[in-house]
Amino acid sequence: MREKHQLSYRYEFHRDELAAIKACNEAHGFAVVKEVLPPEIIESLKKSICEVFEPTLQSSHVFLNPEIIDGLIQSDQLIAETASPKIFTRTMVDFIEKSDAMASLMTYEPYMRIVRALYGEGPVTLNRSAAIYKEPGAGVGGWHTDWEPLEGVYGTNAVLNNTGACSNWFYLTGVNPDNGGLALIPDSHTEDWQGPKGFELTENLRSFHRKDDNLPAYDKFDFEEMLPLYAEAGDLVIFAERTFHGVFPHHGDETRLSCAITFRPGSTGFSPCWQPSESTKRFIASCPPEVQPMVKHYTGHSFSWKSNL
Ligand SMILES: O=C(O)CCC(=O)C(=O)O
Ligand SMILES: [Fe+2]
């Protein structure tokens, strides 16, 4: 077991320390909030993730959509796909639309108080959501920032990750460096951050590599600026839009189940933007009246939308 890193400031908080949580996320680009969810909510989220991912577990794609399937059928990639190696990590980017358990978090006051505090008590809009099903044996997730420049032809990710939303992850089976846990780089959330000592940012600014190599994304955990996180089921891991993070390989024996929501500040949509899907519209209509102000301009996620040049 690795040793837990010591920092000169506290980054783990009780769920009532609202001002300190906000201040830490703003100053250092992350914060961990202990015991936000009680056991019954943890269990219902875990059950929901297992049910929603179940039908996808035999497929070789994480995101099955008609365009991918059509493309595969028309090419000999189908053979390669059939023989492709096991997939250990599957990510769903519209999980809240499929999970009542996750949608209910928007009415769970101990969590929503934290969300409101993070944005200075102003209005917020549901920005995006995700769930990850990571089986033992999963490999490393290289260092990256979720933020993307809005340049050239870009997609939904770039739009949704340029809103000032911070990520709120719940690791429902806990995380540490041995079970596919998260590591992040404190203070890497500012526009002028240049990379760890001895590294430089990649051309698209989304990752970094050592000055003497040209790998697309560094994937080792051997530099001093990085912080491995330890969180229990029910804890909330918050990090800012630009904070750099990486994921350890999964050497444990339990599937890592996690889900995330991000809210963006304000109460508006995007223009120009993709049309909300039928699933997105159904989800918005299903939310109770008290949640409507937060989902009215929720745009969902489009797999095919691209910006104009
Ligand atoms: O697996 C995780 O905990 C984080 C995943 C991640 O960084 C991402 O989906 O962008
Ligand atoms: Fe990420």
Image (cartoon, rainbow, N blue to C red):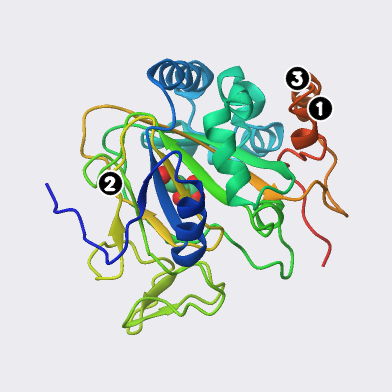
List x then y, in percent, for residue 124: 71, 44
The answer to whether 111 appears left or right of 163 in the picture is left
Instruction: Give the Cα distance between marks 3 and 2.
Output: 39 Å
Residue bearing the label numbered 1: 281
Inspect this view and state whether residue 303 appears: no
Mark 1 Cα-neighbour bin, 10 Å: few <14, some 14–19, many ≥20: some
Kindly identify the amino acid type of the residue bearing the numbered disc 3: Pro
Q: Would you identify the image quadrant in which residue 200 lies? A: bottom left
Task: Looking at the image, tell me whether mark 1 or mark 3 is earlier in sequence order.
Answer: 1
- Residue identifier under label 3: 288
Q: Is residue 15 shown to the viewer in this render?
A: yes
- The disc label shown at residue 249, or none: 2
- Image location of residue 272, percent across then percent down: 88, 54
Instruction: Tell me the residue at 76%/30% (across/down).
Output: 280
For label 3, the SS is: loop
The amino acid on which the numbered mark 2 sits, given as a three-letter code, is: Pro
Q: Nearer the viewer, mark 1 or mark 2?
A: 1
Inspect the image, locate mark 1, and give the three-letter code of the amino acid beneath it: Lys
Q: Residues within 10 Å of mark 2 (few under 14, many from 20)?
A: some
Callout 2: helix, strand or loop?
loop
Give the quarter of the figure containing the C terminus: bottom right
Mark 3 vs mark 2: which is more N-terminal?
Answer: 2
The secondary structure type at the circle numbered 1 is: helix
